[in-house]
Each structure stands twice: as structure tokens, then as C-alpha cells.
Amino acid sequence: MSSRLFILENLVKYGRVRAYDLAKHAPFATSTIYYMLERLRDEGYAEKAEEYYIPTFKTVLEYYKLKGCDGYLVKAVATMLGLHLAQYIGQAELCAALHKLATAGVEAKTPAAAVMEYFNGKLDVKGLLSADPSFKKFVALVLASASAEMDGDHIGILTGGIFVGFCKICGLVATPCRNIRL
């Protein structure tokens, strides 16, 4: 196992790591761990908050490519998107969406940026409505987690007459909605 893979796995598994703690338990030299953490930060795979390194969504996609979808990856994505909303999407649906993003070559640092990168900077509402249900649900989750509450029942965006986000009545949706009160 390379030091890069070791660090990526630990970022996904623990959600945040201190260089010292990681180096203490690593099968690599301490200097290798410190160097690789900084390199991964420079490449956009981690962010540093005080003494902790935190994975970006780019790490999630790289981990998916290297290891596939597992419970650690699902937990990492749920933490990034908010556990209160992530409970509305199943592991198989989440893994299918990650597969779609990873195979498209998306490399964004946040889930919202990844969705926008997938759609080339402009949310393709027609394309989204015809997308497979798991990807549609994932996009709704991402946009709900990145948006503010619209009214008492909706969190997400309204674009072209289509609501994409979380509805307290319908769950995670990308659909026309007449119940939004603006």
C-alpha cells in the first residue's frame, strides 16, 4: 500500500486526522506522512483546519475509484451533506451516484461543485428529470444541503419551474412543485 492510499483511506474512514496521530500509526516514516498530507492538501484532496486534515469530495471520488463503495465512504458523504438529509438516500443509490460522477471524471472539492462540474456549470433540468432515480435523488440531496430553506417545507432550489431539493412531504425530489410558498 502506498502512503497516498493509506492517507486517503484514513481521511475517509475517520473524517479528520491529525498528522501526528496518523504518523504514529502509519507503516511509513513520519516525514513521509507529513509530506504526503501537505501534498494532498495542495492537490485539493484535503483541507486543513487548525491541526486536522479533513477530506474533500475529491477524496471521496478518488477513494471510490480505488476501493469502491463501502460503509466508510457512505458515512463520509453523509457527513459532508448533513446526516439529517442523508438519511433519505440509501447506500445503493448513493454508490450509484458516486459511480456516475467518478466515471465522468469529476474532481471537484465539494459535492455542490461536483454536481455543477458534472453538468458543465449549468444545471440541465431536462437532463436531470430524465436521469436515473438514484442520481436525481443524489442531486436533490446535494442541492438541499447547499441551499437555504425556501419556506417551511422546502430546502433546495427552484429553476425553470422545477424544484430540486428536499420537500417535507415528498422527500428528495427533482420535480415540478405547486406547493412552494415564496
Image: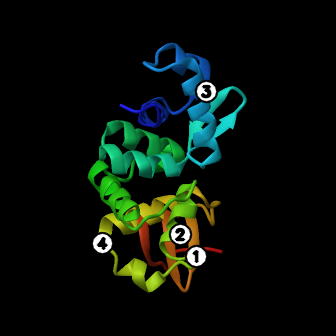
Numbered circle sitting on residue 176: none
- Sequence-wise first label, 4 or 2: 2
Q: Judge from the rendering whether residue 26 lies leftward or rightward of residue 181; answer left or right.
A: left
User: Rounded to the nearest whole Å, what is the CA distance between mark 4 and mark 2?
Assistant: 18 Å
In this figure, which residue is indicated by the disc labeled 2?
117
The x, y position of residue 28, in whole percent, is: 47, 21
Q: What residue type is disc 4 on?
A: Asp
Q: What residue type is disc 1 on?
A: Gly
In this figure, which residue is indicated by the disc labeled 4?
132
Crowding near the residue tagged with mark 1, few <14, some 14–19, many ≥20 C-alpha atoms within 10 Å: few
Crowding near the residue tagged with mark 2, few <14, some 14–19, many ≥20 C-alpha atoms within 10 Å: some
In this figure, which residue is indicated by the disc labeled 3?
34
Q: Secondary structure at mark 4?
A: loop
- Sequence-wise first label, 3 or 2: 3
Q: Nearer the viewer, mark 3 or mark 2?
A: 3
Residue 120 to residue 126: above or below:
above
User: Rounded to the nearest whole Å, what is the CA distance between mark 2 and mark 1?
Assistant: 6 Å
Q: Residue furthest top?
A: 24
Q: Secondary structure at mark 1?
A: loop
Look at 63% across and 36% down and name the residue there. 38
User: Rounded to the nearest whole Å, what is the CA distance between mark 3 and mark 4?
Assistant: 41 Å
The x, y position of residue 100, in whole percent, is: 35, 64
- Sequence-wise first label, 1 or 3: 3
Q: Nearer the viewer, mark 3 or mark 4?
A: 3
User: Rounded to the nearest whole Å, what is the CA distance between mark 3 and mark 2?
Assistant: 30 Å
Look at 55% across and 26% down and name the residue there. 33
Q: What residue type is disc 3 on?
A: Tyr
Q: Judge from the rendering whether residue 127 lies leftward or rightward of residue 59; answer left or right.
A: left
In this figure, which residue is indicated by the disc labeled 1?
121
Q: Nearer the viewer, mark 4 or mark 2?
A: 2
